[in-house]
Amino acid sequence: MQLTRQTRSGLEMITVDADRIDAAVAIQFKDRMRELLADASGRFVLNLERVDFIDSSGLGAIVAAMKLMPPGAKLELAGLSPAVDKVFRMTRMDSIFTIYPSADTALSA
Amino acid sequence: MKAQCLDGDRLSIRTSLRSTPDAVSETLREVRVRLNDMPPLDCLDSTWEVIVAEVLNNIVEHAYDDSHTGEIDLTLLFGPTTMNAEFIDYGRAMPNGTLPCPRDADLDVPRADLPEGGFGWMLIHTLASHVEYRHDGGSNRLALELRLDTKS
């Protein structure tokens, strides 16, 4: 699973370059996020624009990544496709994340 | 995977897969390809995929204890307004022989205590209009019905 971290307009953006975050890649996703968030501070945005499917294991992996953030640092989400958004809403996990419609809106927020 | 068009507007899919997360992923991708070949089923939203994924993942993790050696027989029937799914496995029965009944997770907790799992059955029960389960001799049979929606 390919995750890329870039500094853009003063915030850190992690882009998921995969079409699914499911049970087959959830552990890999969590491990890679742990590496990328090792020195986290400030705002991080997880760009999900390329992801068109998530299951409860993928959702759990994103929550686990959020819990890795040190105090004061924040993991936000951007670019949820309708399918991904629906899973967040049904589990009410949309209430614990700041969610932006796209990576661009996250950058200008 | 065997896919068959019935009466022009229904698609029946039958397949068997190994109890691994990768096989679940591949199976779902293949079903999507079959649906994309058969308008108007190409316009379905992803709820069918979420519910089928959750049941299959549960079989992989719990009925077969992540042993990755089990077999799962899957039948999906997509009609104009509903999907019927049947899952048969030969692993361990559900605890107490019945479907788990999830409670809504408490999200009003410190960040460190937020749940990372337990969403699967909640999604299944929320999405399905009907779910039934039976343990019969050496097999588990779960059948469910889902009302289909198109992409908005």
Image (cartoon, rainbow, N blue to C red):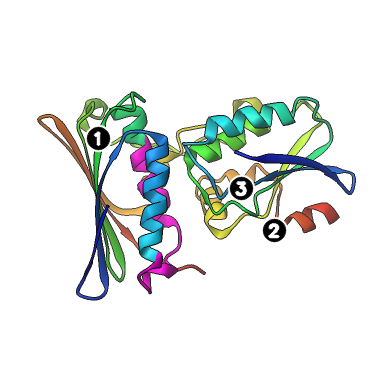
Disc 3: which residue: A94
- Residue at the image point whose x is 80% and y is 26% from the top: A39
Q: Same chain for marks 3 and 1?
A: no
Disc 1: which residue: B71
Q: Is residue A109 visible?
A: no
Could you tell which of marks 2 and 3 lies nearer the N-terminus?
Answer: 3
Secondary structure at badge 2 equals: loop
The picture quadrant where one finds residue B96 is top left
Three-letter code, disc 1: Glu
Q: Is residue A58 magenta?
A: no
Secondary structure at badge 1 equals: strand
Disc 2: which residue: A101
The picture quadrant where one finds residue B17 is top left
Of circles 2 and 3, the one toward us is 2
B62 w.r.t. A18: above or below? above
How far, Cα to Cα, is label 2 from label 3?
12 Å
Left or right: residue B132 versus residue A80 is left
Of circles 3 and 1, the one toward us is 1
Q: Main secondary structure of the magenta part?
A: helix
Q: Which residues are magenta?
A: B36-57
